[in-house]
């Protein structure tokens, strides 16, 4: 039975080539544009969700109150804060520091490669965050000075398919760095983006680096709280902690420093220090794109329904003859719904092709690198199937249920425009006028 329905559906598509092309392509374009916008919105709303301990990770922000200059808050602070918090605060389970991303050259066997997003990082990065180390030991990979971890992409550029573990590369024609690990490429929706991680211990071996409390405001510090830790208790301990380490110096200049712990899950879209962050999002942009995506998809679906309805009226005589020879109302409904689902899924397939064509342009407009087929977007792919089914159901049910309910004698006498006294024209007119 299903095979027969599909055969009839394909015959109708081929018999009405112009209608089929307009209906399928119109829905496909609308779906493609909407999918790309929804993908961007989903990517923004799920930033850093892949981290296992995301609800226990906080970025440390430095707040300065000055009698003359007022209040300022920054996510970029000195390198001494993190180790002191870890050592003296029982609520803090671990901490990790990152330098600002930079570019540099790596050399190996007379082969040079310019890398972006090079970051100095503590060895605890793999404990605090869920970046997966493919090769190497996550506990020791970045402990020693002059050790380095490469992403898969960077390792491929420098070494091809060869194993780089244990190899030594020269950085900026100065330091020799030992490769101790290969890490999976960070997801696109990660606020911490890197191609290379160099051990933070390396900075302690370099000259002119300020790694104490009162100099070198160049680092991001993240803390991971113990599972049952109270953030309020941590705040209560801060005044004497800050007085001991820094405020006893700053008070004579009219300044008092304090710390703010901002949850990882809120940093991308809701942070008060977004100017300091390399991957800050824009909540207004998300609202705008969501509205545009819904509007485009709605217009495409209404156009699809209108064309399907108009075509169903022309098939009234065909359906009446099928009822005369014994076709039941249920079989006719099934046939119309099946054809509608077929059109919807063909449109989805074409939409996916269109997405691959427009994706580079869209990515350049939103300054990201979205990929629909990334594993993290499995929910988007599932949603596409659901939307396609709903579109097919709505577009097919309207003509199916009404056309299957007419009297064959009335249709064969020429009553093609009304079914049981119901006219299609006002409905299609309302849909067109209401959304144009």
Image (tube, grey):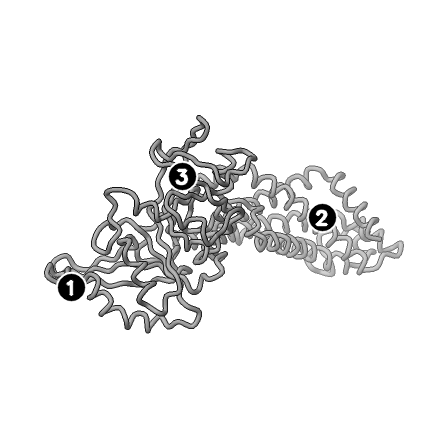
Residue 217: x and y, percent? 25, 50
Residue 235: x and y, percent? 30, 70
Marks 3/2: CA–CA distance: 58 Å
| Mark before the other along the chain sequence, 3 or 2 | 3
- Residue 436, visible in the rendered structure: no
With respect to residue 364, does 237 lie above or below?
below
Say which residue appears at 71% left-offset and 48% top-offset: 342
Say which residue appears at 21% left-offset and 62% top-offset: 245
Give the class, few, some or many, for how many residues have Cα within 10 Å of label 3's Cα (few <14, many ≥20). many
The label nearer to you, 1 versus 2, is 1
Whether tag 3 and tag 2 are in contact, CB under 8 A, the answer is no
Residue 177: give its label: 3
Marks 1/2: CA–CA distance: 74 Å
Residue 108: give its label: none
Say which residue appears at 34% left-offset and 50% top-offset: 277
Residue 401: x and y, percent? 73, 59
User: Circle 2 — which element?
Assistant: helix
| Mark before the other along the chain sequence, 3 or 1 | 3
Name the residue at the top extreme: 110
- For disc 2, the marked residue is 342
Which residue is at the front of the view, 328 or 212? Answer: 212
Say left or right for 136 vs 277. right
Say left or right for 141 vs 409. left
Instruction: Please identify the quarter of the rendering in which residue 269 is found.
Output: bottom left
Instruction: Please identify the quarter of the rendering in which residue 324 is found.
Output: bottom right
Which residue is at the front of the view, 34 or 228? Answer: 228
Residue 392: x and y, percent? 67, 53
User: Circle 1 — which element?
Assistant: helix
Which residue is at the front of the view, 402 or 365? Answer: 365
Marks 3/1: CA–CA distance: 39 Å
The label nearer to you, 3 versus 2, is 3
Q: How many marks?
A: 3
């Amino acid at each position: 039975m299903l095979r027969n329905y599909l055969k009839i559906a394909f015959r109708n598509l081929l018999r009405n080539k112009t209608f089929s092309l307009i209906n399928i392509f119109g829905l496909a374009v609308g779906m493609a544009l909407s999918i790309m916008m929804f993908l961007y919105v989903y990517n923004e709303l799920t930033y850093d969700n892949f981290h296992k301990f995301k609800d226990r990770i906080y970025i440390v922000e430095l707040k300065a109150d000055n009698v003359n200059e007022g209040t300022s808050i920054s996510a970029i602070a000195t390198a001494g804060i993190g180790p002191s918090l870890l050592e003296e605060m029982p609520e803090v389970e671990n901490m990790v520091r990152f330098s600002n991303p930079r570019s540099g050259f790596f050399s190996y066997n007379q082969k040079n490669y310019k890398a972006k997003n090079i970051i100095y990082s503590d060895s605890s990065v793999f404990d605090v965050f869920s970046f997966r180390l493919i090769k190497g030991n996550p506990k020791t990979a970045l402990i020693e000075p002059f050790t380095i971890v490469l992403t898969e992409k960077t390792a491929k550029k420098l070494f091809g398919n060869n194993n780089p573990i244990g190899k030594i590369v020269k950085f900026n024609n100065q330091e020799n760095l030992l490769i101790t690990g290969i890490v999976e490429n960070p997801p696109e929706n990660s606020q911490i983006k890197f191609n290379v991680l160099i051990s933070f211990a390396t900075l302690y071996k370099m000259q002119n680096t300020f790694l104490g409390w009162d100099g070198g405001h160049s680092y991001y510090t993240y803390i991971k709280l113990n599972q049952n830790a109270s953030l309020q208790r941590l705040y209560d301990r801060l005044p004497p902690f800050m007085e001991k380490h820094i405020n006893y110096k700053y008070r004579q200049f009219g300044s008092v420093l304090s710390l703010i712990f901002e949850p990882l899950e809120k940093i991308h879209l809701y942070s008060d220090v977004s100017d300091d962050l390399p991957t800050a999002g824009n909540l207004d942009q998300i609202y705008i794109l969501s509205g545009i995506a819904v509007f485009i998809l709605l217009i495409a679906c209404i156009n699809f329904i209108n064309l399907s309805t108009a075509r169903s009226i022309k098939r009234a005589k065909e359906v009446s003859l099928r009822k005369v020879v014994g076709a039941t109302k249920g079989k006719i409904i099934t046939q119309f719904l099946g054809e509608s689902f077929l059109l919807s899924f063909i449109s989805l397939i074409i939409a996916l092709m269109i997405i691959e064509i427009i994706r580079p342009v869209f990515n350049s407009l939103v300054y990201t690198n979205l990929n629909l087929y990334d594993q993290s977007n499995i929910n988007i792919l599932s949603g596409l199937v659901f939307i396609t089914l709903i579109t097919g159901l709505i577009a097919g049910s309207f003509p199916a249920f009404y056309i299957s309910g007419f009297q064959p004698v009335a249709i064969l006498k020429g009553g093609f425009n009304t079914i049981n006294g119901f006219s299609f024209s006002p409905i299609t007119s309302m849909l067109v006028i209401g959304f144009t």
